[in-house]
Amino acid sequence: VQLQASGGGIVSAGGSMTISCTASRSLDTIDAIGWYRQPTPQSQREVVATSFYGGGTKYLDSVKGRFTISRDRAKRTMYLQMTNLKPEDTGAYYCAAGKTLWSNGNDYHADYWGQGTQVTVSS
């Protein structure tokens, strides 16, 4: 599966932004799709939102209530809607897919990766 992310940019604190990721084939048979964030190239990459094949979702505590992950099956596209953005949300956002998505300290895993799209939140 090839993933193509798009939609990053610069937004003021408190603003909103939606980023998207289009897959080369249907994601319906993939157990988990989601988004990772890496504040700087030297920072840890952590998973911020996951959507599961069974319909559930999971969010990093710091983004709960502000970020929403969704998918459009017909368009083979996943979205991350971000509201009330904070400067600490700044970073490269990577879409990913696979049997499991996880991050733990300096380690992280997904079977398929999109390229990063930069989101910068100005204070």
Image (spheres, rainbow, N blue to C red):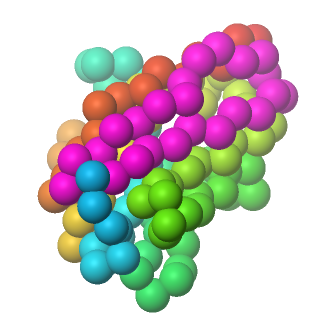
How many dots with numbers? 0
Quarter of the figure with residue 93: top left
Asked whether the viewer can see residue 122, the reply is yes
Residue for point 52% across, 83% down:
55
Instruction: Decide which of 28, 87 is in the foreground and name it.
Output: 28
The x and y percentages for residue 4 are 34, 38
Residue for point 37% across, 18% down:
40
Quarter of the figure with residue 19: top right
Relative height, residue 89 to residue 76 (above, below): above
The x and y percentages for residue 100 are 25, 70
Q: What range of the chain is rendered magenta? A: 1-23
The x and y percentages for residue 106 are 22, 40
Relative height, residue 70 to residue 44 (above, below): below
Q: Is 81 contained in the magenta span?
A: no
The secondary structure making up most of the magenta span is strand
Q: Residue at the front extreme?
A: 74
Q: Is 21 contained in the magenta span?
A: yes
Is residue 71 toward the left or the right of residue 64 in the image?
A: left
Residue for point 27% across, 19% down:
42
Relative height, residue 95 to residue 74 (above, below): above
Is residue 8 toward the left or the right of residue 116 in the image?
A: right
